[in-house]
Amino acid sequence: MKTTNQKTATDWNDYSRSFLSVMPSQMLALNREVASHLTGHVADLGCGSGKIIPFVLDNPLVTGYTGVDSALEMVTKARWMADQFPQKPAQIIHARIEDVEIPKADSALSINSYYNWPDTRRVLTKIADILSPGATFILATINTRLDMQALLNSAEKECIAHPHWSEFRDHNLRICESSSIKLLELDELIRETQLAGFAVEQAHQHLYEGGLSLLVLRKDFSES
Ligand SMILES: C[S@@+](CC[C@H](N)C(=O)[O-])C[C@H]1O[C@@H](n2cnc3c(N)ncnc32)[C@H](O)[C@@H]1O
């Protein structure tokens, strides 16, 4: 396991412009896969710029969306994104997940936010609290096998002409090199989610060339 201090909301604000607009195919595949598991009103914890909103709201089983993020620039962009898809209700809350009352949800997701949480167990427990027993929670986060340089080399072939590509690439390299991230082996991540009250239905590392762990979790019935 590797951990240091966390990135601040200001760091994330700087990343928001390129993060909203650049979507390499590995990220697209991730967003599509995660959105396909969701139902009812969805909570997105650490929603960033809301890149997944079009995919979530397009799922016929989804009725609405609540995103939560602590970086104001990310929130502003996520609100813009939600406004582009007015067919279902969507709201974005500007707050740290651990500090705010989050409305109950029928299913939840969190993509690449976990590694920045100061107290991951506390946040996972908070997510379990907003879900009913049996509800789905999809947790995706980069892991110890991630080779960010290799992943970016691959993405560059698709995105090099994008006006924000170099900004996106440099931010991603900074996230992995100098900052402040909690990267776990898959079995460590699984153990932590179980301790927070989830059962693991599926777990894989097919995306990001092995560098991303994706868990399909169910809120335990025993916790009710
Ligand atoms: C790499 S971005 C991922 C955004 C989005 N989930 C996606 O995949 O498109 C990580 C986001 O997590 C947010 N974040 C990190 N820790 C947080 C916390 N404790 N509470 C709320 N948001 C948090 C950051 O502000 C940032 O926008």
Image (spheres, rainbow, N blue to C red):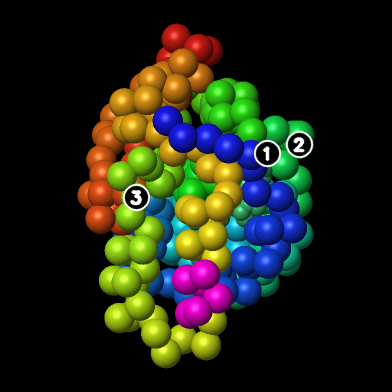
Look at mark 2 in the image and give the residue it sits on.
Answer: 100
Q: Secondary structure at mark 3?
A: loop
Q: Secondary structure at mark 2?
A: loop
Dot 1: few (<14), some (14–19), or many (≥20) neighbours within 10 Å?
A: many
Mark pair 2, 1: CA separation: 6 Å
Q: Residue at position x 50%, y 12% from top? A: 223
Which of 75/135 is in front? 75
Considering depth in this image, is 96 or 209 the residue closer to the camera? Answer: 209
Q: Is residue 74 above or below residue 124?
A: below
Q: Which residue has dot 3 on it?
A: 146
Q: Is residue 200 left or right of residue 99?
A: left
Please name which of the two marks, 3 or 1, marks the residue nearer to the observer.
3
SS state under label 1: helix
Q: Quadrant of the N terminus?
A: top left
Residue under the point 71% across and 50% down: 8
Residue 76 appears in the figure: yes
Mark whose residue sits in front, 2 or 3? 3
- Tell me residue 102's x, y (percent): 69, 37
Residue closest to the far front: 178
Res 143 label: none
**What amino acid is at disc 1?**
Ile
Question: Badge 3: few (under 14), some or many (20 or more) residues near its Cα, within 10 Å?
Answer: some
In the rendered picture of this protein, how many numbered marks are placed on residues?
A: 3
Of the numbered discs in the image, which one, if any, rests on residue 97? 1
- Span highlighted in magenta in the image: 165-170
Q: Position of residue 106 (x, y in %)?
A: 51, 37
- 149 over 221 or under it: above or below: below
Left of 112 or right of it: where is 68? right
Query: How would you classify the magenta stretch by its main secondary structure?
Result: helix
Q: Earlier in the sequence, mark 2 or mark 3?
A: 2
Q: Does the magenta run of residues contain 9?
A: no
> Going from the N terminus, do you reach mark 3 or mark 1 first?
1
